[in-house]
Image (tube, rainbow, N blue to C red):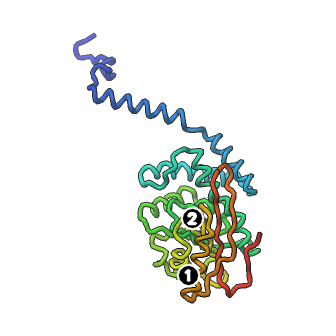
Amino acid sequence: MAANQRDPWRTRASPCTASPAQRAAQSAQHAQHAQHAQHAPDTDRLRERLVQGVAAIGLDLDAGAADRLLAYRVLLERWGKVFNLTAVRDPLAMITTHLLDCLAILPVLRGLSPGDGRQSVVDVGSGAGLPGLVLAVVQPDWTFDLVEPVGKKAAFLRQCQVELGLSNVRVHERRIEALPLTEIAQPPGIIVCRAFASLANFVDGAGHLAGASTWLVAMKAARVDDEVQEFTARQHREGRADPVVARTVPVDVPGLDAMRTLVIMKTTGSDERPQD
């Protein structure tokens, strides 16, 4: 070999030339990749869990909506590591505790909607887009206003809106108390929150947006008898006529061994009542 010719083998890093710290870092990285590959289910398994769960809820899900929901899960996993959007890390668990948990309330919300199929929904304290962003994927004919005051979470919602192509979604980076009715054009048909706050705080924060035909729907993760009684007593004590609790609805989430309850509230000026 000529003196000025480069030995190609010397371009490869030899393990023996790496420092102990570098070798330890490489070993840890390889172990992490191997562990991720071992525990991460493939897309087919995730799709199967989603489709089966949606069918158990009684919903129809076309292939395009399924693709968007699975793409949302990927975004949530990716951004969640940086912005701490969710404590759930297992991909299959994310399908159940996030996607199916939100989709399970859709039959009830449809029952609260007018016969023309149109509906406007305000999601209070949307966070990672639960439930508003998930519902927007499967209800493209509804409009969704996602209200989230934390900047990094609002940025995530906007990114999802763009990447998933959701033209029926608007993101409002502000507290619900500071959201003027003019910003959403008219009183919404439904105001929903998921584990946002107490019923009293929910009503106090979002009540200024409600009209005579607005339903206020609170997603709760446990029994709500005591909280409903406390809220009703508060309303009477302070002389507040609206809203009143119209009913509570148990919600079954496929694959989730936990209780879910919807608290549905309405102004007394309407003769409408929730449907079964």
Residue 107, given in percent of the width and then of the height, sits at: 72, 64
**Residue at (75, 74) in percent of width and height:** 116
- Regarding residue 145, the answer to whether it shows in the image is yes
Q: Position of residue 8 (x, y in %)?
A: 33, 18
- Residue labelled with disc 1: 234
Q: Quadrant of the C terminus?
A: bottom right
Three-letter amino acid code at disc 1? Arg
- Residue 166 visible? The answer is no
At label 1, counting other C-alpha atoms closer than 10 Å, the crowd grade (few under 14, some 14-19, many 20 or more) is few
Q: Quick one: label 2 or label 1, which is nearer the N terminus?
A: 2
The answer to whether the residues at label 2 and label 1 have Cβ atoms under 8 Å apart is no
Residue at x 54%, y 48% (from the top left corner) = 74
Left or right of residue 263: residue 183: left
Closer to the camera in the image, 115 or 258: 258
> In the image, what residue type sits under mark 2?
Arg
Residue at the image point whose x is 67% and y is 45% from the top: 49
Comparing 253 with 3, the one in front is 253
Rounded to the nearest angstrom, the CA distance separating label 2 from label 1 is: 21 Å
Residue indicated by mark 2: 194
User: Could you say which quadrant of the image residue 19 lies in?
Assistant: top left
Camera-nearest label, 2 or 1 = 1
